[in-house]
Image (tube, grey):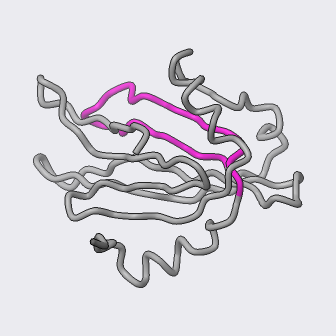
Amino acid sequence: MAKKNHLTSLQREMLSPLTGKIVTGFRYEPSPNRQLFSDKFSIRLRQLEHHDSELYLGIHYKRYGQEQAALNMSTNLLLTDRIERAPLLHGFAAEHQKTLQGFFRQPVTGFYLSIQQTLIVHCAHQSLMFELERSEDEQLYLGWALA
């Protein structure tokens, strides 16, 4: 049974240029203040034949009032040479680094959004799942796992 991808046609059109780009790194920035700022998970991408430019696919959450929040995606093209010197696995604990190393050099093959607002980024051999979650003390955070 096929599952319905809840991305709209506009969202698919905006994300389609990222399909086929290879994963070259990850960056994680936990929120310093969860009431004001989101956790941020970024996937560094580039074309297979080009090594001179990269972009980041950023996944975080955005608050809408006191009770409402939603997953947010953005693409960031950083116009600096510091990208080349950035660590491949910036901000991740050692056990997460081992998990994410398997994604290196895999192309992104697509995106899936479930009705529960779970975003899945499909790569050639593995997928990453992102969800907006609440901790026991009702603080928001960005959850991620292998899908």
Q: Is residue 49 left or right of residue 8?
A: right
Residue extending furthest toward the front: 1
Which span of residues is magenta-colored? 22-44
Locate residue 5, reporting x and y percent. 33, 72
Image quarter in which the C terminus is found: top left
Locate residue 59, reporting x and y percent. 45, 49
Residue ID at (73%, 46%): 105
Q: Is residue 83 left or right of residue 115?
A: right
Q: Is residue 7 magenta?
A: no
Locate residue 32, reporting x and y percent. 39, 25
Residue ID at (29%, 31%): 34
Locate residue 45, reporting x and y percent. 69, 52
Residue ID at (67%, 57%): 107
Q: Is residue 27 magenta?
A: yes
Q: Give whichever of 20, 86 is nearer the camera.
A: 20
Q: Is residue 51 visible?
A: yes
Residue ID at (64%, 29%): 89
Quarter of the image for residue 26 reads: top right
Image quarter in which the N terminus is found: bottom left
Q: Is residue 72 above or below residue 17?
A: above
Q: Is residue 37 visible?
A: no
